[in-house]
Amino acid sequence: MESESAVSNIKIEVKKELDLLISGCEALDMELAFKAYSRNPEFFMIAGDGNYYDFQTFFENNKNYLATCSKFELETIKEDIKVLTDSLVIVSWVYKAVATLKTGRQDIWEKAGATFLFEKINGEWKIINYHESHLSPGKELDHL
């Protein structure tokens, strides 16, 4: 395993990518938000509804949704970055999301979760797998 210093540096590098993804979503800037995602055919994501998507479908779905938004806010509740190897990192992220639609309606996810698997490819950290878990906006379970 890497030295403590190397692990710390890897966590800082990956955290920067996560922060860019968040700020891109909040700026409604899809290119910035999706910069860290791998465009390789091996990329896939599993959505909160259990559907499985390749990069292009995932990107288009998000692009179409964010186009309906006038504002998108993300609040980190908890995050954990685990360095598996010098080229693989898993990030667990719990967050709140508030999407204000151009119609004035708000979609609010009080608590959602995401898991990112980052791989260092050609010197850059890229998300090669993404999984999100959430209920429909405003539908929270009080027994969990």
Image (tube, grey):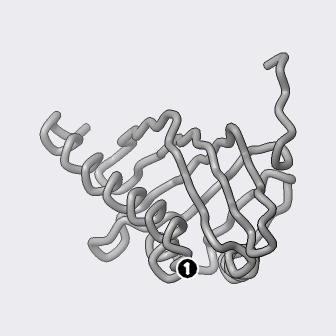
Helix, strand or loop under label 1: helix
Q: Quadrant of the N terminus?
A: top left
Check the image and report above or below for 138 versus 101: above
Q: How many marks?
A: 1
Q: Nearer the viewer, residue 112 or 130?
A: 112
Coordinates of residue 87 in the picture (x, y in percent): 34, 56
Determine the residue located farthest toward the front in the rendered image: 104
Determine the residue located farthest toward the top in the rendered image: 143
Q: Quadrant of residue 70?
A: bottom right
Disc 1 marks which amino acid? Met
Coordinates of residue 21 in the picture (x, y in percent): 46, 65
Locate residue 41 relative to residue 84 in the image: left or right. Answer: right
Coordinates of residue 51 in the picture (x, y in percent): 85, 60
Residue at the (31%, 58%) spot, across then down: 16
Locate residue 1 relative to residue 21 in the image: left or right. Answer: left
Residue at the (34%, 52%) spot, across then down: 15
Locate residue 20 relative to residue 38 in the image: left or right. Answer: left
Coordinates of residue 69 in the picture (x, y in percent): 69, 73
Q: Nearer the viewer, residue 33 or 43?
A: 33
Q: Residues within 10 Å of mark 1 (few under 14, many from 20)?
A: some
Q: Quadrant of the C terminus?
A: top right
Q: Nearer the viewer, residue 10 or 67?
A: 67
Q: Which residue is mark 1?
A: 30
Q: Nearer the viewer, residue 26 or 19?
A: 26
Residue at the (68%, 38%) spot, across then down: 111
Residue at the (47%, 70%) spot, across then down: 24
